[in-house]
Amino acid sequence: DVKVTQSSRYLVKRTGEKVFLECVQDMDHENMFWYRQDPGLGLRLIYFSYDVKMKEKGDIPEGYSVSREKKERFSLILESASTNQTSMYLCASSLEAGLAAYEQYFGPGTRLTVT
Amino acid sequence: AQTVTQSQPEMSVQEAETVTLSCTYDTSESDYYLFWYKQPPSRQMILVIRQEAYKQQNATENRFSVNFQKAAKSFSLKISDSQLGDAAMYFCAYGDRDDKIIFGKGTRLHILP
């Protein structure tokens, strides 16, 4: 079974802190994604990566950056956390060959609260 | 730009009954994929069913089936014999071969015992 894990289920940070959210997948997937999930807004794509050291902006990249130094690991970085970044963050991965052609496998999510 | 619309934010169904969740989308592409994902409370999101647009036959997975109407750009999910474990947030999603997946805002499904 594909497993996507995220470093924390719950995280509380202060405004202005630098925050790292880690995601690891164990199925040698090429593509990895970071989403933000808010009530009434569904899932919104922050960044995605289709290869090591490659990244593409999604729909809401402002205030975020990402890092993919190894194929299995995709990190989301909040350079200076703000209260409007309080949200559920979901990581996902999928096979290669057309980003949307294959099933995305999701991690359990990290609920981040910025105070 | 492609959009996905789920017009029912919340729905309820009696256990063992059938329920249909609606989804419409907008695209100018002819080759694309449609998905229904399920997110149970406090659990990971999983794929329920996938439909390739070039296939006319509606996809089916056990109690879950879709009604895919390509001309109408409609992709509804039917759950038969609803069970308590079906209670979840359901997301409709669209993807084409060279683009990212776009999710709808979700429908929260309650199962009444």
Image (cartoon, coloured by chain):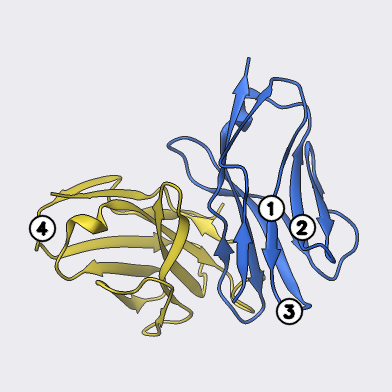
Chain colours: A yellow, B blue
Label 2 to label 3, Cα distance in Å? 14 Å
Q: Residue at x 79, y 32 (%)?
A: B80
Image coordinates of residue A53 in percent, x first then y, are 36, 84
Q: Are marks 2 and 4 on the same chain?
A: no
The residue carrying mark 1 is B23
Depicted A74 relative to depicted B41: above or below: below
Total numbered labels: 4
Instruction: From the image, state whether disc 2 or disc 4 is nearer to you.
Output: 2
Q: Residues within 10 Å of mark 1 (few under 14, many from 20)?
A: many
> Which amino acid lies under the numbered mark 3 shown in the image of this protein?
Glu
Q: Residues within 10 Å of mark 4 (few under 14, many from 20)?
A: some
Image coordinates of residue A32 in percent, x first then y, are 46, 70
The residue carrying mark 2 is B74
- The secondary structure type at the circle numbered 2 is strand
> Which amino acid lies under the numbered mark 1 shown in the image of this protein?
Cys
Nearer to us in this view, B9 or B31: B9
Image coordinates of residue A36 in percent, x first then y, are 38, 58
Q: Quadrant of residue A101?
A: bottom right
Q: Residue at x 49, y 55 (%)?
A: A106
Mark seen at residue B29:
3
> Which amino acid lies under the numbered mark 4 shown in the image of this protein?
Thr
Q: Are marks 3 and 1 on the same chain?
A: yes
Give the mark nearest the N terminus, 2 or 3: 3
- Image quadrant in which the C terminus of chain B is located: top right
